[in-house]
Amino acid sequence: MTSAPAPDMELPPESAGVRAVLAQLQVALHTLVAALLVLTLVSAHRDAAGEPNLPAVAAAIGLAVVYVAGTVWERRRHSGRAARLGWLTAVLALWAALVVQVPEAAYLVFPLFFLALFLLGSWAGAAAVAGLAAVAVIALGLHNGFTPAGVVGPVVGALVALGLAAGVRALYSESQARREVIAELVAARSELASREREVGRETERARLAGEIHDTVAQGLASIGMLLHAAERADPGHPAIEPIRLAREVAGENLTETRRLIEALRPAPLEGVSLGGALHRVAGRVRAEHPRVEVSVTGELPAEPPPELAAVSVRVAQEALANAVKHGAPSRIGMTIAESADHIALTVTDDGRGFDPEAPRAAASFGLDGMARRVADLGGTLAVDSEVGRGTTVRAVLPLPMEKTR
């Protein structure tokens, strides 16, 4: 049953390096057991009178059969902890019976050290190793008299076994740590890919909304104004009815175009103002994270252009998501304000913060995405953070010239 490590050292399939080390250790262990059993059988074959020591031979053969049977069974069935402990108990009992009769059997204690460590775990295995070493020292002393070699040999072997077992556990711990890092990197890559797709979709939607607003919607509005001016200039003109009809058609198409632009805006903006959308975003965060207090303050005297409102909502969503995921805050505050030529959105949390100058991986993608959105509209994004003192994200978006007049 030495083909598997102890229960507290069960390894995941991904730990190929650790499994390779254990496989090599098992081969060495089996070889050592076989060699020492052969030595014991040769020593037990004849006693001092020249006759075979049949009880010792029987114990050695029994030990070999139990050892091989347990190893083969483990490879095929992968037995549980109780079966492994029962097998280890049988092996140790046969060894005890053998070492009483043949002093050379005491050397079998060296592979038994590893069996005990692998099958019993750290503390129980260490205690078993100490007990086995004591039995080996006593057995050698009773057979051949107590000598320095008879005492130092088993003790040094026990220390070597403990050191090797500690090395294997350290290797396993490092493998586990690397496995967790790889899992985190895979998750981060998946998240980055998902955000990249989302950013791409939202960027394209915002671009389409802006293009439609600047071309089709503006053109239809101009056509309507021109037709209305022509209608007022000569109400009695014979073509007044077609002009009126054209103006109505242009107005209907302008209405539909504006609906299309609204459909391209972020979902929280559907049917509400920018302030209402920010309240929706805050409410969603409160619902998903009840322990986080989220507040929204500030009002705008007039609704900003759709593209500014859309970017403001996206910045708010990303800043809140980053704060909750990476900062573990208890309070988050959002403030929206408008000045003569710009609107400003500020998101402040009391989380753990971070060093803005330090290298960042997955977390920086959200900040880069916000900065890119804001920069596309000619604005600026500032991030003020310090480890242990929270984070403040401030987006300043310029208002169009016609809005500031």
Image: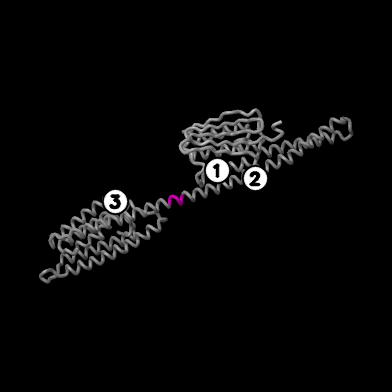
Quadrant (top left, top right, bottom left, bottom right) of the N terminus? bottom left
The residue nearer to you, when weighing 396 against 192, is 396
Q: Amino acid at mark 1?
A: Gly
Task: Report the mark closest to the observer, 3 or 1.
Answer: 1
Q: Is residue 97 visible?
A: no
Task: Determine the secondary structure under disc 3.
Answer: helix
Crowding at mark 2 (Cα within 10 Å: few <14, some 14-19, many 20+): few
Distance from label 3 to label 2 (Cα)? 58 Å
**Residue 180 placed where, x, y %?**
43, 50
Location of mark 2 (residue)? 204
Magenta run includes residue 138: no
Look at the numbered disc 2 and give the secondary structure of its residue: helix
**Looking at the image, how many numbered discs can be counted on the residues?**
3
Bin the neighbour count of mark 3 within 10 Å (Cα to Cα): few under 14, some 14-19, many 20 and up: some
Question: Which one is in front, 400 or 242?
Answer: 400
Relative vertical location of residue 58 with respect to residue 397 in this rendering, above or below: below
Secondary-structure class at tag 1:
helix
Sequence-wise, which precedes: disc 3 or disc 1? 3
Look at the picture and state if 322 lies above or below 16.
Answer: above
Magenta part of the chain: 179-183
Q: Earlier in the sequence, mark 1 or mark 2?
A: 2
CB-based contact (under 8 Å), mark 3 and mark 2: no
Residue linked to disc 3: 122
Type of amino acid at the residue the image marks with label 2: Glu
Residue picked out by circle 1: 366
Q: Could you tell me how far apart the alpha carbons at marks 3 and 1 are, in whole angstroms?
A: 44 Å
